[in-house]
Structures are given as C-alpha cells and as structure tokens.
Image (spheres, rainbow, N blue to C red):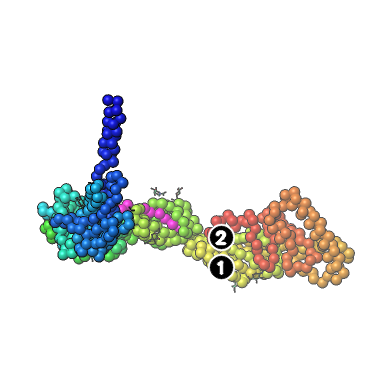
Amino acid sequence: MALCIPVLSLLLLCSFFRRALSDRVEVLLPDVVEVREGGTASITCSFSIPGHSHYSYLHWLYEKNGRTNIYYMGQDRQFAYDTEYKDRIRMADNFTLLISEVTLQDERTFLCQIGAGPAGFGENRTELRVYKSPEPPDITVNDVGILVTDDETPEIAKCKSRNGYPTPNITWYKNRNSLHQGRDGVNIATTVIKESSGLYTVSSTLHSRLSKEDRNASFYCEVNYRLPGMDRMMESERVNVTILYPMESVTLVVESPSRLVMEGDRVVLRCKGDGNPPPAYTFLRVQEDPVDGAEMEEEIEASDGLLILESVRRNESVHYRCRALDFNSGVSLQADTMLSVNYLDAIQMWPESPVELSLGDNATIHCSAMGSRTLAFHWQWKGEVIALGPLLNLSSVDFKSSGHYSCVATVPGVPGLNASKGVTIVVKGPPLVSVKHHSLWVLVNDVINVTCEAFGHPAPEITWSVNGSVLHKRETHQVSSELSVQVTQELLRSGVMCYARNSLGSSEELIRLQEVTVTTHPTANNTVGPIQKERKREESKGVLIVAIIVCILAIAVLGAVLYFLYKKGKIPCGHSGKQDITKPGTQPEDIVVEMKSDKAPEETELLPGPTGEKPLPGDQGEKYIDLRN
Ligand SMILES: *[C@@H]1O[C@H](CO)[C@@H](O)[C@H](O)[C@H]1NC(C)=O
Ligand SMILES: *[C@@H]1O[C@H](CO)[C@@H](O)[C@H](O)[C@H]1NC(C)=O
Ligand SMILES: *[C@@H]1O[C@H](CO)[C@@H](O)[C@H](O)[C@H]1NC(C)=O
Ligand SMILES: *[C@@H]1O[C@H](CO)[C@@H](O)[C@H](O)[C@H]1NC(C)=O
Ligand SMILES: *[C@@H]1O[C@H](CO)[C@@H](O)[C@H](O)[C@H]1NC(C)=O
Ligand SMILES: *[C@@H]1O[C@H](CO)[C@@H](O)[C@H](O)[C@H]1NC(C)=O
Ligand SMILES: *[C@@H]1O[C@H](CO)[C@@H](O)[C@H](O)[C@H]1NC(C)=O
Ligand SMILES: *[C@@H]1O[C@H](CO)[C@@H](O)[C@H](O)[C@H]1NC(C)=O
Ligand SMILES: *[C@@H]1O[C@H](CO)[C@@H](O)[C@H](O)[C@H]1NC(C)=O
Ligand SMILES: *[C@@H]1O[C@H](CO)[C@@H](O)[C@H](O)[C@H]1NC(C)=O
C-alpha cells in the first residue's frame, strides 16, 4: 500500500501534464486579413507542437468548392502548386504567406495546415478581404423645378459612385443633415450594379417632399466605403434645387427716395410677390371717378415689378396698385400704396414790394404759401433771421429800417422743400439835416470847407445859403454836401445855412462862424496885441528867431501843463485835444492862438485845418442814428 501512493501520484501528475501540454498541434491565424486590390496580402501562420516534436510539413490551401493546395513546405523541400497563385505567392521565413497583386477573386478563405508526425496535425483559417475605393460621387439635380404643392415626393437628385468594392453606401444630406429613408417624406431608391470587373457601381435617387422653406436648401450625397483598417467617405458637390411655390402675398412699397417724397423727385415703387417663379406685375393708377365716386384704374407702363416716376408732380399723389399674376397657380393678388408728393407753392406777400412807409410808421408784412403740409415761416434781413412766423411786424420805422427783407417758407420734415420771396421796404420822410460842427473858428479871407448831411427818402437835395464850390455825395439813405467858400465879413455875420429839401418837407441847419484872434507874445521889439482882420507877414528874421525860441518855451510849458492835466485825468485819453490848439496850417509858427467867443467852449470848434473836419467824440451829428451801419 505504501508503495502504491507514489506510483499513483506519478500517474496523476503524468496525466495532468498530458492535459496541460495539449496533445494537439495548435495553429494560429488572423481571422481576417484586409488588403487593397492590387496590393500584397500577408497571412501569418504560427503554431505550437506538443512535446519536443518538430513540424514535418506546412501546407497553404484555399477553400472554394472544396480545398486547393497552393503551397507546400516540408523538411527538405518547398514549392508552390501549379495554381493561379503559382507566380504570385511566396513564403517568408516566419511562415508568412505573401500574395501579391491581389484581385477581387482572391477574396476567399486561406488555410494553414501543420503536420508534426506523431503529434498529428493542426490547421486554422483566415478570411482574405479585398477592398477597392469607388470613384467620387457624381450628383445630378432635377433642374426642372420642384413644385411644393405636389402630393407625391418628387425626384430631387441622383447620385452615382462607380467601381467600388465591396458595395459602397450612399447617404444623402440636406443642409448638412443626413436624410433617412421614410422620414419627413424622404424616399431613397438605391440600385447596385455589378460591373463585369466585379466592382460595384451604386446609384441612389433621392425623392423628397419639399416646402417653400427649402428654397435655399443645398443637397449633396456622400459615399461611404472601407479600405483596409479604416472607414472612408467622399462628398459630392452641393446642388441647389429650384423650388416652385405659389405666391401667397404681394407688397408694394416706395423704394426711393427714403425720405418724404416731394415734387421733382424720381420715385421708384417696387412690387414684389413671394412666389417662385416671380409673378407677372401690372401697375395701375387708381382714382375716383369725379361723377359717381367709383374707382377708376389706369394702367401704367412698368417693368419687372418696378414703377419709376420721373420728376413727380402733386397730381401724382394718388393710389397706386400693383397686380401680380402667378401663372403656375393662377393666383392673382394685388397691393395698394398711397403716394404723397409734398409741394410748396410760391410765396404770396402783401403788401406787395416795394412797401413804402413813413418815418415812425408801424407796419405788418404778411407772407403766405400753399403747401402739402403745415408750413414754417421765417424772415431774414441782412442774412440774419429776424422773425419767426408768417408776419413781420415793424414798429416805429426809421430810415435804417429800409432794405430788402425776405420771407422763407419751409416744409418741416421735408428738407430741401422751401421757398422764399423778398420785399423791399422804403421808409419815406422829410429830410433830417446834420452838420458836423455848429460853430467854426475862422479867419477872414480863408477858404473854409463845411459839410452838411441829410437823411431822407426820397433823397433830399442840399442847398447852401452862400455861393461857393459844392461837392455832393450820395449814399443809400444819405446825401452829403461839402461847400468851399471864402470867409467874408458878411459871412461872419450871417453864418452858413444848409438847407435840405425833398418832396415831403425840408429842414435846415446853421453853421456859425467866429473870428479867430491871433496874438504874438511880448518879446524884443515886437508889439503885443491882437491882430484882427489882417495878416502881418513882414516880420524881420531876428524877431522870427526870438519868436521861435519863445514859442518853443511856451510849447514846453504848455506840454508840461497838458501832461499834468492828463495825469490828473482832466484830459481823456484819445480826445483830440492837440488838434484843438493847433494853429491853422497856413500860419507860421510864431503865432499863439486865443479864442474869443461869448459862447460856451464846448459849443465852439476851431477850424482844424485844410484837410477838412475830423469827427470828434460827442459830436452833435450823432444825435441822428447813423444809417450807414
Ligand atoms: C485560430 O486562430 C485563432 C487566433 O488567430 C485562435 O483564437 C483560434 O482558437 C484558432 N482556431 C483553432 C481551431 O485553432
Ligand atoms: C514575417 O516576415 C515578413 C516578411 O519577411 C514580415 O513582413 C512579417 O512582419 C513577419 N511576421 C512576423 C509575425 O514576424
Ligand atoms: C446655391 O444657392 C446659394 C445661395 O442660396 C448660392 O450661394 C450658391 O452659389 C448656389 N449654388 C449653385 C451651384 O447654384
Ligand atoms: C453600408 O450600410 C450598411 C447598412 O446601413 C452597413 O451595415 C455597412 O457597414 C455600410 N457600409 C459602409 C462601408 O459604410
Ligand atoms: C399732372 O398735371 C400735368 C399738368 O400740370 C399733366 O400734364 C399731367 O398729365 C398730370 N398727370 C396726371 C397723372 O394727372
Ligand atoms: C406804433 O406802435 C407803437 C407801440 O408799439 C405806438 O406807441 C405808436 O403810436 C404806433 N405808431 C403809429 C404811427 O401807429
Ligand atoms: C404782429 O402784430 C400782430 C398784430 O398786428 C400780432 O397779432 C402778432 O402777434 C405780432 N407778431 C409778432 C411776431 O410780434
Ligand atoms: C432749401 O433750403 C436749403 C437749406 O436750408 C438750401 O440748400 C436749398 O437750396 C433750398 N432750396 C430751395 C429750393 O430753396
Ligand atoms: C449867387 O450867385 C448868383 C449868380 O451866380 C447870384 O444871382 C446870387 O445872388 C448869389 N447868391 C448869393 C447868396 O450870393
Ligand atoms: C476844401 O475842399 C477842397 C476840395 O474838396 C480842397 O481842395 C481844399 O483844400 C479844402 N480846403 C480846406 C481849407 O480844407
């Protein structure tokens, strides 16, 4: 018994090892080998043999209506059987079978068989799959146009992909979304043709119900196929379908101008029906019969849904109608629009230009115009807006109110539509006379110039009380006259009178003349005293020199006094004080001037010199408004 246990144990162990180390020859082959047509297929065969046995032979076969040997390898020799594979196969050292220039017919099952003498033999199989990519898909679209009302599903497009292996699949897309048979009215018919080459050509026809919303849809097909180790696809180009749908509405709009229409505009009316193909358009002008109020239609020439009205007038402000006829569906629709042509008539004004007013009058000028809308008015004078509204109120007019005024009418909301009319206002009145100086210091026998100005309308005529040479000047509302006259004793007494006269009246001004007293200073042998009425010009040279020195001294003293007064503010800066004391130009430097007058000093003026009178601040002439400004 004790001996039995080790024996039994050995037997059990032996049987265990026999089972673990399979007693069969095991051959390992890939289930599937994929290869492109024309490529080389390699089928690897590996095996294990139980015990220490060596393989005695390796056999490659294929299965088709039974088995065919194609390659043999024994211990001492190896060869290819005389089959179609004879020239295309070889075997690598690692027992891999290589089949070159694979054809579609090679798609079959290959077997590797290993014989190992007493260990028996084993085999395994591989399916060889051959692939060929098809040509890119070719799409043709139904170019007749698809009517969306059709009940049946119309043909949209055809797609064809040639010469693939195995059979490729075709998928349809609408706007990047794939279409599926039976869904949304989609019907896809596929036909597969096996070419004589054994390759497959797949054709697919897409039928689908479409709606108006598909008018911008694009369609394409995609071919799916497999190559060794990967799935591939190719897309066709995109196609548009022509979708025909009936018109459902029509619109008529003023396309241009984009602002309110006014007379003279080029107006474009556009009519648009929403059907495809576009309907035929007819434009009509709609007016009411003046007799019975019935609608009257008048056809207008237009093309392609565009009505162009060149330079519209106000009588074109009527209803326009567009009628659109869809030939496919027989539907006729119409749309109306009212065209409002804005206008502005010429301005009416009263009283009419020129308007004559009297000095101090109050007046209102009325301006009015007819327009398509409420108008806005304003008045302009000298380029500035002086009043808003249609009325121009003038109160207490004076001569400077005369001039050219204009009334401007605008149409709010319609820029560019405006009108204007001018009115000339003339303010009439008797003359107003002004003289620069009411009083003048003069020397007898001097020729003096005096000036007189007159305002008035009609233009006044100026005359003088004395004869002399006269120079007239005429400006818009103003006449001036300059008189050159020699001073006589008689003139000193009477003064110079200026008369201004027009058809409405007259007025006058007196210019008083006062004699200047000329004094020389008491120096050397010169006598002191006033010189009146005569000029003494025979002074000796010595006297003259002394007089000059005295004069310089006097001027220096005078200058100091003036400077002192100026500093104390007694003499306003800019006042022409120097002129006041300058001697007449004809006089030599040895004369100091004194004024002899019984008048208040501010009322008198020294004749300034031969260059004429200079305007002085506070001049009395300013009591009249200067109309030249
Ligand atoms: C054939 O080989 C595969 C591995 O390629 C293996 O899984 C299978 O068991 C083998 N079949 C036979 C009958 O040996
Ligand atoms: C066997 O040999 C061939 C060619 O020599 C090589 O392409 C292949 O990869 C080898 N296979 C294995 C499993 O080693
Ligand atoms: C298709 O329509 C789109 C616009 O809807 C256009 O851009 C495209 O050019 C069209 N394609 C063809 C081939 O007519
Ligand atoms: C073709 O379509 C069938 C069924 O839809 C699918 O089983 C097959 O894998 C497809 N082939 C390719 C190459 O995509
Ligand atoms: C508008 O009036 C002008 C004349 O002022 C006339 O010639 C034209 O025919 C009229 N147009 C319409 C549409 O009545
Ligand atoms: C003009 O109107 C003013 C008040 O604005 C009035 O005082 C004056 O008398 C009027 N003048 C005339 C001439 O009517
Ligand atoms: C102008 O005068 C009229 C009366 O004469 C008055 O009704 C109107 O308001 C005045 N207009 C202006 C702008 O003063
Ligand atoms: C209307 O007014 C504008 C400026 O406001 C001007 O440019 C245009 O010439 C005017 N048109 C007419 C017809 O007066
Ligand atoms: C002016 O001269 C004319 C002659 O030319 C004479 O008749 C008239 O009396 C003179 N008038 C004065 C005011 O001297
Ligand atoms: C008076 O005016 C005349 C011409 O305008 C001129 O020649 C003359 O010199 C002036 N006389 C005086 C004293 O200003």
* Distance Cα–Cα, label 1 vs label 2: 14 Å
Q: Residue at 75% across / 50% down in the picture?
A: 567
Compared across the picture, whether 391 is left or right of 88 comes to right
Q: Quadrant of the C terminus?
A: bottom right
Compared across the picture, whether 177 is left or right of 594 comes to left
Residue 403 lies in the magenta stretch: no
Task: Out of 148 and 468, give the one closest to the viewer.
Answer: 148
Q: How many marks?
A: 2
Residue 382 spot, x, y in % from top left: 47, 59
Residue 377 lies in the magenta stretch: yes
Q: Give the residue type that dot 2 points to.
A: Val
Q: Residues within 10 Å of mark 2 (few under 14, many from 20)?
A: many
Q: Secondary structure at mark 2?
A: strand
Decide whether the magenta segment is chiefly helix, strand or loop.
Answer: strand
Q: Is mark 1 within 8 Å of ligand 10?
A: no
Q: Quadrant of residue 507?
A: bottom right
Which segment is the magenta one?
Answer: 373-381
Label 1–label 2 contact, CB within 8 A:
no
Q: Earlier in the sequence, mark 1 or mark 2?
A: 2
Q: Give the residue type that dot 1 points to.
A: Lys
Label 1 belongs to which residue?
A: 473
Q: Residues within 10 Å of mark 1 (few under 14, many from 20)?
A: few
Q: Quadrant of residue 14?
A: top left
Q: Secondary structure at mark 1?
A: strand
Label 2 belongs to which residue?
A: 433
Q: Residue at 71% across / 67% down in the picture?
A: 444
Residue 624 spot, x, y in % from top left: 56, 56
Residue 491 at least partly seen: yes
Q: Quadrant of the N terminus?
A: top left
Residue 201 at least partly seen: no
Q: Residue at 38% across / 54% down in the picture?
A: 377
